[in-house]
Image (cartoon, rainbow, N blue to C red):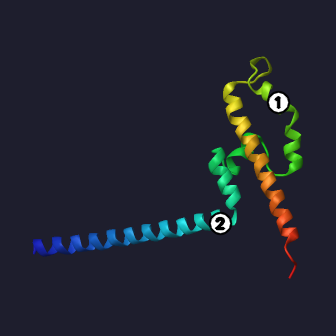
Amino acid sequence: ATYHSQCGFLAAVAKYLARIIVMCVQEFVASRAAADAWGRARPQSAAVSNLSGLSLQEAQPILNISKLSPQEIQKLQPPLQPGDLNNKSVGGSFYLQSKVAPAKERLDEEVRIQAQEDRERQQMPQT
């Protein structure tokens, strides 16, 4: 009786593990499909993230930007002089420069991409 009860228990555990594995694979496939679809929807933006090392979501809080617009980026221009970011007498540091400069470049590039996408949409024939 003990052998048969152990086999039944092991069979139940094996079924449970198989279900977990199937669910994990399904979740992985769905996640991968969503990531691929997002990358196709914004291929330039995804490429910029890979090149700069910063995503848009990472760059915005570094510069305290909630809404991405050319006007918001222009407001940043005066305090973000490259010489000031590394000048300790005005509160700068190499660490600050290593965070702020790439974030600013990432946001500038995103604004440029959005402007290009807007121009392309305007040029498309209306149906």
* Amino acid carrying mark 2 in the image: Arg
Residue 40's label in the rendered image is 2
Seen at 76% across and 52% down, the residue is 110
Answer with the quarter of the image where residue 37 lies.
Answer: bottom right
Q: Are marks 2 and 1 in contact (CB under 8 Å)?
A: no
- x and y percent of residue 122 in the render? 88, 69
Q: Residues within 10 Å of mark 2 (few under 14, many from 20)?
A: few
Extreme bottom residue here?
127
**First reached walking from the N terminus: tag 2 or tag 1:** 2
Total marks placed: 2
Q: Residues within 10 Å of mark 1 (few under 14, many from 20)?
A: few
Q: State how far apart marks 2 and 1 are (Cα).
A: 35 Å
For disc 1, the marked residue is 81
Seen at 73% across and 36% down, the residue is 101
Task: State the quadrant of the C terminus.
Answer: bottom right
- x and y percent of residue 17 in the render? 32, 68
Please, is residue 19 above or below residue 114 in the view? below
Task: State the quadrant of the N terminus.
Answer: bottom left
Seen at 76% across and 21% down, the residue is 87
Which of the two residues, 39 or 96, is positioned nearer the viewer here?
39
* Secondary element at tag 2: helix
- x and y percent of residue 35 in the render? 59, 63
Residue 4's label in the rendered image is none
* Amino acid carrying mark 1 in the image: Gln
Please, is residue 9 above or below residue 79 in the view? below
